[in-house]
Image: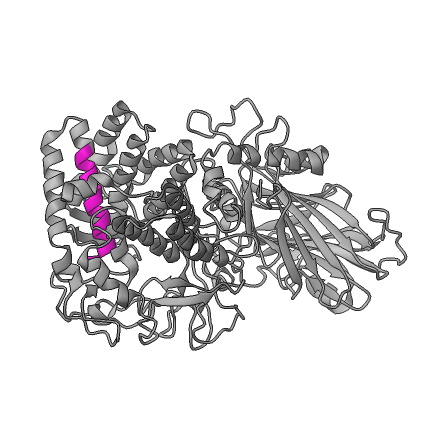
C-alpha cells in the first residue's frame, strides 16, 4: 500500500441544499488531514442480537442450485438485519460473512447531536402488505422519533435483487432550522472488526480487507466525508461535543483496525429524503459499480423487483407458490401475519452459494458483549437438528423444492473418510459447521444423525424423492448413518476422541450433557425404524431387520433408563414418577449427578426436568396417553417448584383473554442472562454461577403438538378443542413475536435482575429470529390445520406395537 505522508489542508465544507431544503447556515471550516490517527480504534463487538427484522432477496433455484447463469440477473448475496431501529450486521457472500456491525444516521442541531444508538421511540412495519396486514416481502419501514420532538426519521430498507447492494431510503422531518443529517457505517469486512482499511473518494466512501470491498454512495453527492478509527477519529465525538466536523480524514492510512465511515447528507427540514446504497464487490471498482447501478434504477424499480411486482420474481411470488398458506392461515389467531412472515424468514436464512444450507439464526447471541476481533459465525451456521426442524417446516408450507435441496445439502456435513481431520469412524453428522462445510464444533449428537434419515423418509412419502433417488441416498448417506446408530464407533476429529455406544449420546439436544436422553432416544428409534423401511425398499433385507431389531431393543429400555419411579422433587404435584432430562447411567432411579454446565453446578439427575419426553409422542415412539408420558406432565407443568428447577411459566395475553404457557429448556439451565447481576451470558468471556436459561417460545409449540396428539388419542379433537389449542398455543407463540414479527430463542421470564429493562415475555438478547422457533410455529399451525401431527411417523408406531 502506498505510504501516505501526513498532509493537512484547510477547506470550506460547503453546506449545500438537500432535497430542496434551503441552507441557512454556512458550514464550519474543517481541517482535512490525509491519515486518521488512533489505530486500531476501540475494541470491536458484534451488534445487539434481538433483531426486529431480517431481509434478503428471494432467488429462484436453477435445477436445485442458485446460479448466476440464470435467465435473470446474477444472484444477490446480500443479507441485512435490524435491531433497536438500526441497520445492524449486513452480510455479503456467504450468509455468515458480516461486512458491517451497523449503519446509523446522526441528526445534528445547533445544540444537540442524536444518533440512532441513542434512546429513540422506534416502530417497525413492512412496506408491502396485503389487505389483511400480512407481509408480502421482507422490506421494512422503520420510524424513529426523538423523545424531545425535535425530529423524526423514517427508513425504508431492502436489497437489490439484481445486484450486490443494500438500498436505504431515509426521510427526515424537523421544524427546526440549521439541522443536518449524517450517516455513519462501522465496517466489519470479512466477518471481523479489526483488519479493515477505509478512504474517501469522489464517488463515495470505501472500506476493504484483502479483496473484499464495501462502498457507501448516495443518489446525491455527499456534502462532506471522513473516515477514521472507531471511537477515536471517527468524527462522532466531534459532532457530539461541537455539533461540527472540525477535522476530517481522507484515509485510515497504512494501519488497519476498527474503522468507520462518515458522510454528511445535508440540511433537513420537512420530508428531506436521501437514498443510499451500501454495496459490495471483490475490488473497489466493482463495489462502486454495484451501488451506482442500484441507485440508477431508483427506489421504486428496486423495491418492485424485490417485492415481485409485475414480471419480476420476488417475495410475493414465493408466498403465492405456497399452496397450504390459505388454509393454514385459518388456524392462526392473527389472520396469518406471523405465518407469512415465518415462511419468508425461514427462506431468508438459507445460504445462496451452498443451496439448501439452512442456518439457525441471522444473529450472534448477546452480540454487543461478544468480541469481534476475530471472525465468528454465532448462530449463522448449520446445526442438523435445527436444520431438520426447518426442512420439515418447508414441507408443511408446501415448499418441497427447498426441503429436497436442503436434504441433498446434508451430505456435505456428514463425517466420511475425506472429512478434514477425521481419524475415526464415519456416518455421523457434524455438530455445527459453516455453510460451506467448514468444521466448527465436532461433538456427536445422535439425534442429528437420526434426523436426516427421518427427513428422507418423509420426502419419499410425499413423492419428493423417487424410489430410485431414495435408494441412491440410502447407499450414499442414510445407511452409514443408520449403521452408526446401531454400532456406534470412535469419534476422533479435532478435540473429540471418544467411543460412542448408542443409544447413549455424547451430547443431547442442548449440547451440554452425555448419556441417555428421552429426546435423543426418540429420534434414534424413529431414525432406525424409518431406516429399516428405506432399507427394505432398497432391497437390503438384512440391514432392514437389523435396524428394526435394534430400534426395538432401544425402545424397550426407555423407561428403565430414563423414567424414574423414585423421584425426589419437592413438589405437591409429583408422585415421584416422571421422565428425567438425561442420565449418565442406565438406572433411572440411581442418584448420580449430571455434569456442571454454563456456570451451574451439577445436580442429581432426578431433580432435572425437561420437555424431551414429548418428542417420544411426536415421533410415534409412545402413545400420547402412555402412562410414563401422562405421569410426567404434572411435574413438567408444576409452577410451584423451586425457581431454579421450575420449567413452566405462565404469561398473560395482552388482550386480557387469559394466560398461556412458556417453558425453559430444563431445570437448572444456565444458558441466559445472569439473574444476580443482569449481565449477558458469559459476559467478559466467563461463565458465572448466576447465569439462568430463560423461557424458549418453541416449547409452547411442542406442548401444543402434544395437546393435538392427546386429543386425537382421546377422540376429542373437535372444533371446540381445535379452537382452544389455537387460542392458547398458537396465539401464545404469536404473542412471543416482537413488533417485526421475529420469534426469539428466549424471552424474559421475570426472574432476577432485569438490567436490560425487558417486559415479561419479551425476547432477550440471545438470538432473534430463531429459525427453530419459526419452524415450530409453522408446523403447529399445519398440524392443527390437518388435525394430526405434521412430523409424526406412523411407521414407528406400527413397528413398535
- The residue segment tinted magenta is 516-533
- Assess whether residue 235 is covered by the magenta stretch: no
Residue 63, given in percent of the width and then of the height, sits at 43, 24
Which residue lies at the image location 10% right of the left edge and 42% below the top edge? Answer: 549
Residue 36, given in percent of the width and then of the height, sits at 67, 57
Which residue lies at the image location 22% right of the left edge and 54% below the top edge? Answer: 625
Q: Quadrant of residue 643?
A: bottom left
Residue nearer the viewer, 554 or 711: 711
Residue nearer the viewer, 677 or 609: 609
Q: Quadrant of the N terminus?
A: top right
Which residue lies at the image location 75% right of the left edge and 41% below the top edge? Answer: 219
- Is any part of residue 172 visible from this angle? yes
Residue 298, given in percent of the width and then of the height, sits at 72, 36
**Position of 70 compared to 16: left or right?**
left
Q: Main secondary structure of the magenta part?
A: helix
Which residue lies at the image location 57% right of the left edge and 35% below the top edge? Answer: 316
Please, which colouring scheme is shown?
one colour
Residue nearer the viewer, 480 or 585: 585
**Position of 301 compared to 695: left or right?**
right
**Position of 2 compared to 485: left or right?**
right
Residue 581, given in percent of the width and then of the height, sits at 24, 62
- Is any part of residue 446 visible from this angle? no
Q: Quadrant of the C terminus?
A: top left
Q: Measured along the vertical axis of the image, is residue 490 above or below residue 248?
A: above
**How many callouts does the rendering have?**
0
Amino acid at each position: 500500500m502506498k505510504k501516505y505522508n501526513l498532509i493537512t489542508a484547510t477547506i470550506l465544507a460547503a453546506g449545500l441544499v438537500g432535497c430542496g431544503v434551503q441552507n441557512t447556515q454556512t458550514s464550519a471550516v474543517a481541517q482535512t488531514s490525509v491519515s486518521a490517527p488512533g489505530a486500531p480504534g476501540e475494541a470491536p463487538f458484534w451488534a445487539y442480537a434481538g433483531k426486529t427484522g431480517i431481509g434478503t432477496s428471494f432467488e429462484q433455484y436453477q435445477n436445485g442450485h442458485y446460479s448466476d447463469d440464470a435467465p435473470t440477473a446474477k444472484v444477490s448475496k446480500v443479507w441485512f438485519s435490524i435491531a433497536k431501529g438500526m441497520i445492524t450486521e449486513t452480510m455479503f457472500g456467504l450468509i455468515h460473512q458480516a461486512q458491517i456491525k451497523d449503519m446509523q444516521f446522526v441528526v445534528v442541531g445547533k445544540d444537540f447531536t442524536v444518533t440512532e444508538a441513542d434512546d429513540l421511540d422506534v416502530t417497525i412495519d413492512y412496506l408491502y402488505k396485503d389487505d389483511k396486514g400480512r407481509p408480502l416481502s421482507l422490506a421494512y419501514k422503520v420510524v424513529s422519533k426523538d423523545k424531545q420532538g425535535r425530529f423524526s426519521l423514517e427508513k425504508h430498507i431492502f436489497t437489490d435483487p439484481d445486484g450486490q447492494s443494500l438500498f436505504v431510503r431515509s426521510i427526515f422531518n424537523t421544524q427546526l432550522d440549521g439541522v443536518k443529517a449524517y450517516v455513519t457505517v462501522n465496517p466489519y469486512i470479512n466477518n471481523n472488526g479489526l483488519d479493515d482499511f477505509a478512504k474517501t473518494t469522489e464517488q463515495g466512501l470505501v472500506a476493504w480487507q484483502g479483496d473484499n470491498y464495501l462502498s457507501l454512495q448516495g443518489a446525491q453527492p455527499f456534502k462532506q466525508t471522513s473516515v477514521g478509527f472507531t471511537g477515536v477519529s471517527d468524527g462522532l465525538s466531534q459532532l457530539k461535543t461541537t455539533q461540527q466536523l472540525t477535522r476530517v480524514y481522507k484515509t485510515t492510512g497504512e494501519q488497519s483496525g476498527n474503522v468507520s465511515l462518515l458522510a454528511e447528507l445535508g440540511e433537513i427540514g420537512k420530508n428531506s429524503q436521501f437514498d443510499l446504497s451500501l454495496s459490495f464487490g471483490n475490488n473497489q471498482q466493482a463495489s462502486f459499480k454495484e451501488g451506482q447501478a442500484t441507485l440508477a434504477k431508483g427506489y421504486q424499480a428496486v423495491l418492485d423487483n424485490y417485492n415481485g411486482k409485475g414480471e419480476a420474481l420476488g417475495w410475493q411470488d414465493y408466498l403465492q407458490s405456497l399452496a397450504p398458506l390459505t388454509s393454514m392461515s385459518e388456524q392462526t389467531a392473527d389472520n396469518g401475519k406471523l405465518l407469512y412472515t415465518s415462511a419468508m424468514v425461514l427462506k431468508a436464512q438459507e445460504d445462496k452459494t451452498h443451496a439448501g444450507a439452512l442456518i439457525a439464526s441471522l444473529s450472534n447471541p448477546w452480540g454487543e458483549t461478544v468480541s469481534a476481533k476475530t471472525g465468528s459465525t454465532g448462530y449463522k451456521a448449520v446445526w442438523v437438528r435445527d436444520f431438520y426442524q426447518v426442512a420439515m417446516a418447508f414441507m408443511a408450507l408446501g415448499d418441497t423444492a427447498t426441503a429436497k435441496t436442503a436434504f441433498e445439502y446434508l451430505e456435505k456435513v456428514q463425517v466420511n473418510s475425506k472429512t478434514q481431520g477425521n481419524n475415526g469412524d464415519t456416518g455421523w453428522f457434524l455438530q455445527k459447521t459453516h455453510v460451506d462445510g467448514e468444521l466448527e464444533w465436532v461433538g456427536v449428537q445422535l439425534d442429528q444423525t437420526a434426523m436426516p434419515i427421518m427427513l428422507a423418509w418423509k420426502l419419499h412419502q410425499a413423492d419428493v424423492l423417487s424410489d430410485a433417488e431414495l435408494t441412491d441416498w440410502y447407499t450414499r448417506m442414510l445407511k452409514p448413518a443408520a449403521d452408526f446408530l446401531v454400532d456406534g464407533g470412535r469419534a476422533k476429529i479435532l478435540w473429540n476422541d471418544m467411543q460412542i455406544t448408542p443409544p447413549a449420546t455424547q451430547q443431547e439436544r442442548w449440547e451440554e450433557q452425555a448419556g441417555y436422553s428421552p429426546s435423543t432416544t426418540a429420534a434414534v428409534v424413529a431414525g432406525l425404524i424409518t431406516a429399516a423401511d428405506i432399507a427394505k425398499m432398497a432391497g437390503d433385507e438384512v440391514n432392514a431387520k437389523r435396524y428394526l431389531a435394534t430400534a426395538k431393543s432401544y425402545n424397550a429400555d426407555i423407561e428403565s433408563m430414563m423414567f424414574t419411579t423414585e423421584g425426589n422433587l419437592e413438589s405437591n404435584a409429583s408422585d415421584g414418577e416422571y421422565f428425567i432430562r438425561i442420565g449418565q447411567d442406565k438406572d433411572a432411579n440411581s442418584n448420580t449427578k449430571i455434569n456442571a454446565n454454563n456456570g451451574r453446578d451439577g445436580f442429581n439427575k432426578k431433580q432435572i426436568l425437561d420437555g424431551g419426553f414429548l418428542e417420544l409422542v411426536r415421533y410415534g415412539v409412545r402413545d400420547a396417553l402412555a402412562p410414563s408420558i401422562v405421569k410426567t406432565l404434572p411435574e413438567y407443568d408444576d409452577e410451584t417448584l423451586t425457581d431454579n428447577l421450575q420449567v413452566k411459566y405462565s404469561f398473560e395475553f395482552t388482550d386480557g383473554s387469559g394466560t398461556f404457557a412458556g417453558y425453559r429448556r430444563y431445570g437448572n439451565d444456565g444458558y441466559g442472562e445472569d439473574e444476580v447481576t443482569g449481565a449477558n451470558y458469559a459476559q467478559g468471556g466467563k461463565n458465572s454461577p448466576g447465569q439462568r436459561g430463560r423461557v424458549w417460545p418453541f416449547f409452547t409449540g411442542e406442548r401444543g403438538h402434544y395437546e393435538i396428539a392427546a386429543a386425537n388419542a382421546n377422540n376429542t379433537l373437535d372444533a371446540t378443542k381445535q379452537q382452544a389449542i389455537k387460542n392458547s398455543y398458537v396465539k401464545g407463540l404469536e404473542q412471543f413475536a416482537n413488533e417485526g414479527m421475529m420469534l426469539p430463542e428466549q424471552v424474559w421470564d421475570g426472574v432476577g435482575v432485569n438490567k436490560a429493562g425487558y417486559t415479561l415475555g419479551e425476547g432477550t438478547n440471545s438470538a432473534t429470529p430463531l429459525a427453530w422457533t419459526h419452524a415450530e410455529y409453522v408446523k403447529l399451525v399445519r398440524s392443527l390445520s390437518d388435525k394430526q401431527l405434521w412430523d409424526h411417523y406412523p411407521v414407528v408406531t406400527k413397528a413398535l406395537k
